[in-house]
C-alpha cells in the first residue's frame, strides 16, 4: 500500500497548498511551500502531518514506512559537488553510516534551518559512537544560489562541535530532481516572481538510510527529543553504535 505523508503550507491569501509526487509506488507528499516574500518563521504550521499507518508500536517516534525506500544504483552513483568543493556520491557517504537525507535550500526562512538545527541538537544528545557514525546530508533544491561555499557557511551554523560535519550537495537541477524522485521526495524548480522574490517548493521530510534503505521518515516539526531517541535506536538496530 502506498504511503501518503502530507504537510500543508499557506500562501499570502491563506489558501492551503500541497503537492504530490509518486515514485516507485511510494507517495511522499510532505511539502514545504516557501515563498521568500510570503513566509515567516511561523508559516509552516498548517494541518499536522498525517500518515497512512501507525508507528505507535514500532519503538520509533518518526513514521515507519510500510516498505523501505531504497537508494537505486543511479542514486547511489550520481556524482555531486559537496560543500567542501569535492565530489561525492550518496553511496559513498552512506556506506557504514546512518545517513539522514534532507532536500531543501539555504534561503529557506523557516523549515530548513529549523530542521538542520534540530538534527544538530539531537546529535549532541546521543552517544559519541552514534554521532561518529551519523551523516547529515543536505541536498539543495536551489542549486543556482546554493554553491558549495554558501552551503558550507550555512551548514556550519548547525554542526558546531559534532565529530561529523553536515554535508551539502549540489548538482544540476535535473540530477537533483531525479534523485529526489527516486526516494519519493517532491521538488519543484525555483520560481522567480514578478517582484523579484524566489519561491521554492520542496518536500519537508528527512529520510534515515542504513545500508541503502530508509524505513523511517521524520516530518517537519519533529522534536529534538524524538530525533535523538530515533537516531540512537536506529544506530543500535543497524549495529552502528
Image (tube, rainbow, N blue to C red):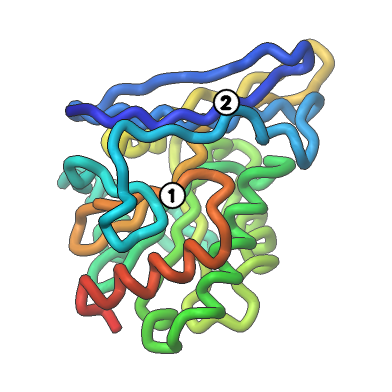
Camera-side residue of 48 and 8: 48
Q: Which mark is residue 24?
A: none
Q: Give residue 85's position: percent from left, percent from top.
A: 51, 61
Instruction: State the residue position of label 1.
Output: 218
Q: Quadrant of residue 174?
A: top left
Give the number of marks: 2
Query: Where 145 falls versus 58 (above or below)?
Result: above
Asked whether, in this view, residue 116 is left or right of residue 182, the answer is right
Query: Where 12 falls versus 156 (above or below)?
Result: above
Q: Residue furthest bottom?
A: 128
Q: Give residue 28's position: percent from left, percent from top.
A: 36, 31
Q: Which mark is residue 8?
A: 2
| Res. 181 visible in picture | no
Q: Quadrant of residue 137?
A: bottom left
Query: Where 7 falls versus 41 (above or below)?
Result: above
Residue at (37% x, 74% y) in the render: 232
Camera-side residue of 201 and 50: 50
Element type where label 2 sits in the image: loop
Give the mark, 2 or 1, whose residue is nearer the N terminus. 2
Q: Give residue 26's position: percent from left, percent from top.
A: 25, 30
Amino acid at each position: 500500500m502506498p504511503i501518503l505523508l502530507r504537510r500543508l503550507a499557506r500562501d499570502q491569501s491563506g489558501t492551503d497548498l500541497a503537492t504530490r509526487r509518486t515514485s516507485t509506488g511510494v507517495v511522499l507528499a510532505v511539502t514545504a511551500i516557501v515563498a521568500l516574500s510570503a513566509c515567516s518563521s511561523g508559516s509552516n504550521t498548517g494541518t499536522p502531518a498525517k500518515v497512512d499507518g501507525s508507528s505507535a508500536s514500532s519503538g520509533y517516534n518518526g513514521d515507519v514506512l510500510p516498505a523501505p525506500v531504497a537508494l537505486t544504483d543511479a542514486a547511489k552513483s550520481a556524482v555531486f559537488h559537496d560543500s567542501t568543493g569535492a565530489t561525492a556520491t550518496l553511496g559513498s557517504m552512506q556506506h557504514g553510516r546512518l545517513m539522514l537525507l534532507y532536500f531543501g535550500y539555504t534561503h529557506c526562512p523557516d523549515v530548513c534551518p529549523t530542521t538542520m538545527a534540530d538534527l544538530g541538537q539531537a546529535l549532541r544528545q546521543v552517544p559519541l559512537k552514534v554521532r561518529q557514525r551519523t551523516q547529515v546530508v543536505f541536498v539543495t533544491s536551489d542549486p543556482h544560489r546554493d554553491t558549495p561555499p554558501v552551503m558550507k557557511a550555512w551548514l556550519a551554523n548547525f554542526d558546531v562541535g559534532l565529530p561529523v560535519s553536515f554535508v551539502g550537495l549540489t548538482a544540476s537541477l535535473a540530477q537533483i530532481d531525479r534523485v529526489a524522485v527516486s526516494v519519493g521526495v517532491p521538488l519543484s524548480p525555483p520560481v522567480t516572481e514578478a517582484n523579484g522574490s524566489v519561491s521554492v517548493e520542496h518536500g519537508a521530510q528527512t529520510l534515515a538510510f542504513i545500508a541503502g534503505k530508509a524505513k523511517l521518515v521524520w516530518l517537519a516539526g519533529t522534536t529534538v527529543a524524538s530525533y535523538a531517541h530515533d537516531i540512537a535506536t536506529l544506530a543500535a538496530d543497524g549495529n552502528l553504535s
